[in-house]
Image (cartoon, helix red, strand yellow):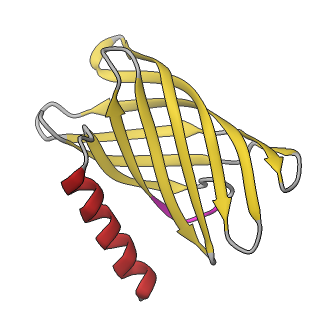
Amino acid sequence: MKKVVLLIALLVGIVSHSNAQEVGLRFGGSNGLGGVAIDGVFSMGQFSRVHADLAFWDGYMGIDGLWDFIYRPLGEEAFNWYVGVGPSLLVGDDFWLGVSGEVGLEYGFKEVPLVLGIDWRPTFWVIDDTHLGVDSFGLNIRWAFGK
C-alpha cells in the first residue's frame, strides 16, 4: 500500500511541477522490471524529445532517460514513430547501470488528448554484470497536455 501511495504522489508531483507534454503509464518491462512505470515525454524541438520512465517493482526502482533523436510522423499525422537512446539505472539490493535503445510507434487521438504507444527497449547493462537484455516491451498510455 505504501508503494501505491508513493507512486500516486510521485505522479501528481511530476504533473504539477514539470513541463511534460505527455504523462501517463507504461505497462510491461522497464529496466528488467515488470509491472507499471510512470511515463513522461518532454519536447526538445519539433523532431526530438526526452522519454523518461520511473518504475518500482519487487524492492527495486528503475529509471530510464531516453533521448528520442528521431521522432517523425508516419503517413497520416496521428501516427508517429521514434528511435532513441539513453541511460538506464536499476537500484535495489544491487546497482545496475546500462544504456538502453528504444524503437516505438504511437497514435495520438485527435478527439481526446490521449496517446497510445508500443515500444521495444533493448538494454546493454555495463555495471553490476555485463549483458544484453532484449526482452523489454511496453504499452504506453499517456495524457497529452496542451492539445
Is residue 144 found left or right of 75 in the rendered image? left
Question: Which residue is the extreme one toward the right?
Answer: 130
Is residue 105 found left or right of 8 in the rendered image? right
How far across and how far down the image is residue 77, in percent?
26, 16
Residue in front for this viewpoint, 43 or 108: 43
How far across and how far down the image is residue 56, in percent?
53, 68
Q: Is 92 above or below relative to 77?
A: below
Residue found at x 17% / y 40% = 145
Residue found at x 88% / y 53% = 129
Quadrant position of residue 80: top left
Is residue 96 found left or right of 71 in the rendered image? right
SS assignment for the magenta stretch, majority: loop
How far across and how far down the image is residue 125, in percent?
79, 45
Q: Is 121 above or below relative to 72?
A: below
Residue in front for this viewpoint, 40 or 77: 40
Question: Which residue is the extreme one toward the top?
Answer: 75
Residue found at x 63% / y 46% = 88
> How many labels, in total?
0
Q: Is 105 above or below relative to 119?
A: above
Question: Which residue is the extreme one toward the bottom?
Answer: 1
Q: Is residue 134 magenta?
A: no
Q: Magenta residues?
A: 33-37
Quarter of the image with the C terminus is top left
Residue found at x 24% / y 64% = 12
Quarter of the image with the N terminus is bottom left
